[in-house]
Amino acid sequence: MMKLTYSYFGGYHICLIFFQVIASTSENLMVTAPTEHLVARVGGQAELSCQVTPPRSVEYMEVRWFRSGHSQPVYLYRGSRGGDGEAAPEYENRIELVKEAIGKGKVALRIRNISIADDGSYRCSFNDSVFSYVASVNLSVAALGLKMRIHVQSSGYGGFIVGCFSEGWFPRPRMEWRDSKGEVVPYSSISHSQDADRFFHVNMTLFRNQSQESITCCVINPLTGEEKQANLILSNALFNENNMKKIIFIFISISIVLFLLYILIVIFIKSGVMGTTEVLLFAHCVAFNLLQIVVLSMKISLALMSQYVKHDQEIKV
């Protein structure tokens, strides 16, 4: 009868070959992510995908999605035996793992109702009992401004200050003035701020002293290249308001001086220092005419002021 013998060396050799095959297979695996710029709009959705290469099923693997700089996962899939995945509280009901191609090593994280808070870098991690594979995906969030306003007011120096205001942008937009030929006109001042939801509010001004000119305010999103415009035609009538302001000031000043003179004459009449009756009658006549002139001057001033009201107009686009 033949006796079976066991070689410890042979068993060790077989195990070594087995682990070398596993290590070789694992070392050849890698995780890749799309290199193109991923941009999503506020309120829209985005899919962040990762692919194991060479393609192989990763259904049995644990898949984790992290935000860069955070230790807690955004989404955790525990493999085919782990049931449904788990989402972080801030992503509840608006995030899911797309697994249609998981048999070929590809998964995607779908995020709905995108907000500015979702902007940033994400890492996908594939883990089995021995190895871990990681790749990074960048998500950029964009928002197009909701409205624009152009504000025109007199500068008091023979021209006008044109202001352009817009809000609801992300990231911080680029602003520029353009003339009727489409050429960029240097701005006088520019400023920006952010609200609690991280939306940008931007404001830009321009001093102009030319009439019959078209000027356009342009606000551009640097991520998408989309822009919004507001156009204004600065007419001669608008610039003539500057002279109207001076005329109003002159008429009001004349009215005040004449009214003070009228009061002075009335005081003299009542004091009885006018002397003869003829002088007194003349004083009464002068006082009456002065009062008429004051009333007429005030009426002219009010009429001019009603025309001047439009100098501080706002145009909403």
Image (cartoon, rainbow, N blue to C red):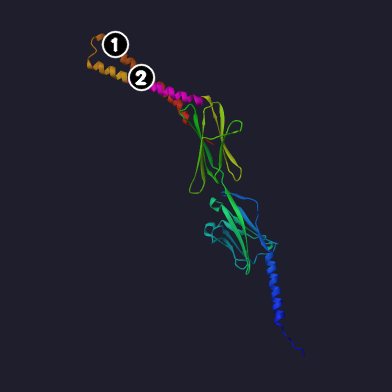
User: In which quarter of the view is residue 63 placed?
Assistant: bottom right
Instruction: Examine the rendered structure and indicate whether residue 135 appears above or below residue 246.
Output: below
Task: Pick whichever of labels 1 and 2 is earlier in the sequence.
Answer: 1
Q: Is residue 272 left or right of residue 23?
A: left
User: Is residue 297 a member of the stretch shown in magenta?
Assistant: no
Q: Is residue 64 left or right of residue 304?
A: right
Residue bearing the label numbered 2: 294
As shown in the figure, which amino acid type bears the numbered disc 1? Phe
Query: Residue 278, how many percent across, how many down?
Result: 26, 8
- Residue drawn 71% across the image and 80% down it: 9
Query: Residue 176, how many percent across, how many down?
Result: 56, 37
- Residue drawn 55% across the image and 39% down it: 175
Residue bearing the label numbered 1: 282
Q: CA distance from mark 1 to mark 2?
A: 18 Å
Helix, strand or loop at label 2? It is: helix
Q: Is residue 59 left or right of residue 288?
A: right
Q: Is residue 19 left or right of residue 193?
A: right
In the image, the segment drawn in magenta is: 237-259
Report the quarter where the N terminus lies.
bottom right
As shown in the figure, which amino acid type bears the numbered disc 2? Val
User: In which quarter of the view is residue 302 placed?
Assistant: top left
Structural crowding at the residue carrying mark 1, measured as other residues with C-alpha within 10 Å and reported as few (<14), some (14–19) or many (≥20): few
Q: Which mark is residue 101?
A: none
